[in-house]
Image: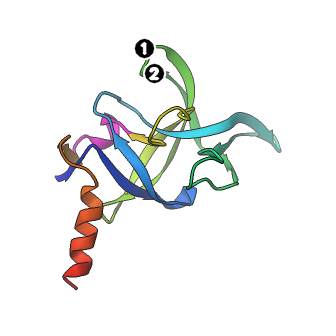
Amino acid sequence: METIGRIDKADFPELKLRNISIKVDTGAYTSSIHCHHVKEIDLNGEKYIEFELLDPSQAKYIDKVFKVKNYQEKSIKSSFGNTEQRFIITTIIVIFGQEHPIELSLSERSDMKYPILLGRKFLSHRFVVDTSLKNVSIKLKREKKKNI
């Protein structure tokens, strides 16, 4: 198993996000991503969710509306202890040079420092968390480039 620190960077190719900051949170079960304008829509008799990622104030913001057909709606307990209904999408995360499927809840995180939170469901059986470390994957990437 790979060791990951409390914050790092990752890519989400299907969401057009590269080198985006993530926070590791072993207290959260579900991983989440900051979005806004999330709504369920009907296209030609089929249900989709539509959303925009991040905020215009964030450097990694892409002015793009995403439409996803395969999604779920689940009750998620927020960090404040409130239960709320959220949409969950499945996508790909690339971290430590490896692709992994990941479920992300679409969440309003504008008041949070990191737009993406990795929870226990994703971390389990993949990573050991060392909270004293930061940006482990970036440091490994730099070391590999230096040794080439």
Where is the C terminus found, in terms of image quarters?
Answer: bottom left
Q: Position of residue 42 (x, y in %)?
A: 79, 38
- Residue occupying image coordinates x 67% and y 50%: 66
In the rendered picture of this protein, how many numbered marks are placed on residues? 2
Q: For this rendering, which residue is in front, 120 or 22? A: 22
Colouring scheme, one of rainbow, by chain, secondary structure, one colour: rainbow
Specify the amino acid type for callout 1.
Answer: Gly
Disc sitting over residue 105 in the figure: none
Left or right, 87 with respect to 28, comes to right
Q: For this rendering, which residue is in front, 135 or 86? A: 135
Residue tagged by mark 1?
81
Q: For this rendering, which residue is in front, 21 or 12? A: 21
User: Relative to residue 67, is residue 76 depicted above or below?
Assistant: above
Q: What range of the chain is rendered magenta?
A: 118-125
Q: Position of residue 117 (x, y in %)?
A: 41, 39
User: Relative to residue 83, is residue 58 depicted above or below?
Assistant: below
User: Relative to residue 64, is residue 76 depicted above or below?
Assistant: above
Q: For this rendering, which residue is in front, 73 or 86? A: 86
**Element marked by disc 2:** loop
**Element marked by disc 1:** loop
**In the rendered image, which quarter is residue 99 located in?**
bottom left
Residue tagged by mark 2?
78
The 10 Å Cα crowd at callout 2, few under 14, some 14 to 19, many 20 or more, is few
Q: Are marks 1 and 2 in contact (CB under 8 Å)?
A: yes
- Residue occupying image coordinates x 56% and y 28%: 86
The 10 Å Cα crowd at callout 1, few under 14, some 14 to 19, many 20 or more, is few
Left or right, 120 with respect to 115, comes to left
- C-alpha span from label 1 to label 2: 5 Å
- Residue occupying image coordinates x 44% and y 42%: 114
**In the rendered image, which quarter is residue 48 located in?**
top right
Residue lying at the far top in this picture: please name it. 82
Please tell me whether residue 53 belongs to the stretch shown in magenta: no
